Image (cartoon, rainbow, N blue to C red):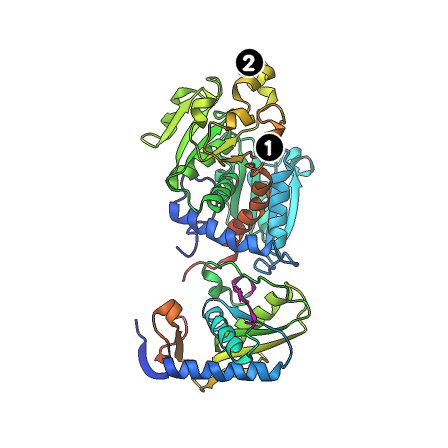
Amino acid sequence: MAERLKTVLLQAADIDRALTRMAHEILERNEGGQVALVGIKTRGELLAKRLAVKIAGIDGKGAAPAVGGLDVTFYRDDSALRSKPAAASELPFSVEGRTVVLVDDVLYTGRTVRAALTALLDYGRAAKVQLAVLMDRGLRELPIRADFVGKNVPTSSRERVKVRLSEADGEDSVAIFDGPEGA
Amino acid sequence: MKRLNRKDLLDLETASAGEIGLILDQAAAFREVASRPVKKVPALRGKTVINLFFEPSTRTATSFHLAAQRLSADVLDIKVADSSVKKGETLLDTVATFEAMDLSVLIMRTSHAGSPALVAAHSKASIVNAGDGMHEHPTQGLLDLFTLKNKYGRIDGLTVAIVGDVLHSRVARSDTWGLLKLGAKVRLCGPPTMCPADMVGLWPGAPVTVTHDLRQALEGVDAVQMLRLQLERQQRFLFPSTREYSQHYALTSEKLAYAKPGALVMHPGPMNRGLEISSGVADGPQSAITTQVANGVAVRMAVLYLLAGVEAEG
């Protein structure tokens, strides 16, 4: 492995604080509206679950938003990245007429979000779609922006951003490594 | 395992447990697609899939056609009556013609064992065997495995009976290969003319047994696959009468009671109701027959996607 750790951007407490703030912002923006959180697999789904718990805690009425997980492998336009097996999506609710917040760990080229928007349309017509990401690293290749951002960090395409979450990786952290994506 | 390291799917005999597992996992993702309001994904957009069927088939041809369409491929169905093969063109020339039109996947059903393999050796396109003579019908085997795995969560350690004209059945062969690769035990059952004792020689040393007694075959099994009785075999004196065959080998509720409680009943279709299977069993709570059909589309989507939609490494 040629990759070398450069900086740890967020540690567990930072991630938690960012998610708390994002939960507040999502509530504020959608006051009175019933949002559904749809996480992009794998780590976006884990973040969506955490956000749902936080939103339920803040809201007082205690009703956690519906949470789904979306696998966008079949919708990707970069077929080289389509080389891993897809997991099944789970959207246990109707998106018809709802406000859906797409959740992902890192916003980079925007191609994953583009694929997720296409996939979401196949489930019905959501009233609104918003985007929440833990980390926006810039370098967009499509006209896509996030509505809720945990942290903005400009990066270079020669760097690699890795989000680790305790549910999948045993610890919470966001770090930058040397070496391009997919290396 | 992330991708199939093969161009074609010709049989389950040469498939590894890892490859079969990958196809079944991928099929689970496609089964979810079938539950959406829009049952279509753009994974094979711009690819061409041709269904070349030299034998009549409704369910397999329809299932492959739907699978290709739900992956957004362009799909053509060619029945032999319409094709130039009837005008004397060789099979390889027909395929070369398709290939000149940028064919990605050719799905073949023929009565000649081995002809998909012949085509595969001469074509850059991926060849999927949709049944070749008495050899194999790998996607049927895969969908049966998928149906079993959804019910039991595993294949390893299951005991499955396959009953009927085992000797002439490509379904029985693909099922048996698949079940053995994933660690199941297989009991083959039928009259001696259709299920000779020396069939076990095809799988030396494997946990396959042959019996001519349906009760013995069913005792304690987790699932049973009832094969279709091909009535034209009677003309070849393989069984004396349909009535006698039925008495010995039809799956009825009384016979099914010998299997484990809740054992899964499968049939690759089309069924001869009242002949190899009673309507009570076919429509009963243990029957997975319509589930098999639904799973068939998901499994075929997985196969087409893994062969044509996933880039090779490098």
Q: Is residue B198 magenta?
A: no
Chain of the residue under the numbered disc 1 shown in the image: B
Query: Viewed as shown, does residue B14 lie left or right of B59?
Result: left
- Residue at x-position 40% and y-position 20%: B197
Circle 1 or circle 2, nearest the eye:
1
Query: Viewed as shown, does residue A124 lie left or right of B7?
Result: right
Query: Viewed as shown, does residue A136 lie left or right of A65?
Result: left
Q: Quadrant of the N terminus of chain B?
A: bottom left
- Residue B282 - label: 1
Badge 1 marks a residue whose secondary structure is: helix
Which residue corresponds to mark 2? Answer: B237
Q: Which residues are magenta?
A: A63-75
Q: Residues within 10 Å of mark 2 (few under 14, many from 20)?
A: few
Mark 1–mark 2 Cα distance, whole angstroms, equals 27 Å
- Residue at x-position 36% and y-position 77%: A179
Visible residue check, residue A68: yes
Q: Picture coordinates of residue B2 (x, y %)?
A: 42, 57
Badge 2 marks a residue whose secondary structure is: loop
Q: Picture coordinates of residue B230 (x, y %)?
A: 58, 24
